[in-house]
């Protein structure tokens, strides 16, 4: 799996958009970008994933640069409940395979009231 | 619908002891994975099981073992506990055929080894 680099921590004001960057300069053509988050005292929660097109769901938007070497997770209107550690994971789509996810240290996003 | 459940929530053991952690997957999910999360780090993959067989294993010593039961629940066993085994142990489930990347995690069992 390609290596990812994320800032260790970020602050964002409540109600503003939170933009979390992830660098993955060694990404391969068949590797997807996945985002998970982990709220304190809970297990990780899947957010979104994408290959090369921008993606949006009810939780967030994922913007992947044209060269696919970096991406940004956007929480459009951050709330206090979005305070969590956000993990960017790059790997091939397994289609149900048996290997596990590789988590780094992630970005600790703190939403300020 | 109930999510992934794990028991116990917290546990304290001493070095050299054995521990068993339990996981019940979401109803209908037949694949269960276990992860270890040491304080300040991301979760690290230990095992995946489905159809009662080990299907994947991370870089953990043989002191770690697991099994899956006919109802798809699972146990993680750790023998000869070391101080470094203190961690949050997470269980994740998914339906068979669904991508490994979209897993549903439980709240974890926090193990402290003294």
Image (cartoon, coloured by chain):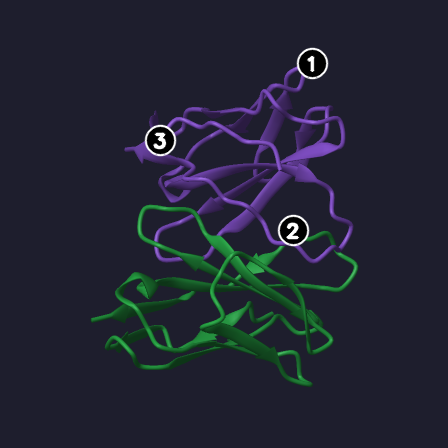
Chain colours: A purple, B green
Q: Which disc number belongs to residue B108?
A: none
Question: Can residue B103 be seen here?
Answer: yes
Secondary structure of residue under mark 3: loop
According to the image, label 1 marks what residue? A66
Q: Residues within 10 Å of mark 3 (few under 14, many from 20)?
A: few
Residue A17 percent across, percent down from the top left = 46, 24
Same-chain check, marks 2 and 1: no
Secondary structure of residue under mark 1: loop
Secondary structure of residue under mark 2: loop
Which chain is mark 3 on? A
According to the image, label 3 marks what residue? A8
Q: Are marks 2 and 1 in contact (CB under 8 Å)?
A: no
Q: Residue at x 53, y 50 (%)?
A: A45
Q: Are marks 1 and 3 in contact (CB under 8 Å)?
A: no
Residue A23 percent across, percent down from the top left = 53, 22
Residue A79 percent across, percent down from the top left = 40, 37
Report how far apart the C-alphas of labels 1 and 3 lie in the structure.
25 Å
Report how far apart the C-alphas of labels 3 and 2 lie in the structure.
24 Å
* Residue B83 position by quadrant: bottom left
Q: Residues within 10 Å of mark 2 (few under 14, many from 20)?
A: many
According to the image, label 2 marks what residue? B102
Q: Quadrant of the N terminus of chain B?
A: bottom right
Q: Is residue B113 left or right of residue A36?
A: left
């Amino acid at each position: 799996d390609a290596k990812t680099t994320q800032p260790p921590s970020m602050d964002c004001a409540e109600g503003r958009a939170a933009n979390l960057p992830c660098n993955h300069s060694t990404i391969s053509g068949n590797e997807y970008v996945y985002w998970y988050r982990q709220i304190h005292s809970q297990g990780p929660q899947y957010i979104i994933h994408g290959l090369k097109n921008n993606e949006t769901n009810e939780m967030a938007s994922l913007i992947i640069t044209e060269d696919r070497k970096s991406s940004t997770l956007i929480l459009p209107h951050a709330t206090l409940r979005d305070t969590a550690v956000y993990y960017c994971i790059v790997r091939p789509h397994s289609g149900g395979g048996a290997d596990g996810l590789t988590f780094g240290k992630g970005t600790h996003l703190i939403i300020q009231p | 619908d109930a999510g992934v459940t794990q028991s116990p929530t917290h546990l304290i053991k001493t070095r050299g002891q054995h521990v068993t952690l339990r996981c019940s997957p979401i109803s209908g999910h037949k694949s269960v994975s276990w992860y270890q999360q040491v304080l300040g780090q991301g979760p690290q993959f230990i095992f995946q099981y489905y159809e009662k067989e080990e299907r994947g294993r991370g870089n953990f010593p043989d002191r770690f073992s697991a099994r899956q039961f006919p109802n798809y629940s699972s146990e993680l066993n750790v023998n000869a506990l070391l101080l470094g085994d203190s961690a949050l142990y997470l269980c994740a489930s998914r339906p068979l055929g669904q991508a490994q990347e979209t897993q549903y995690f439980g709240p974890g069992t926090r193990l402290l080894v003294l």
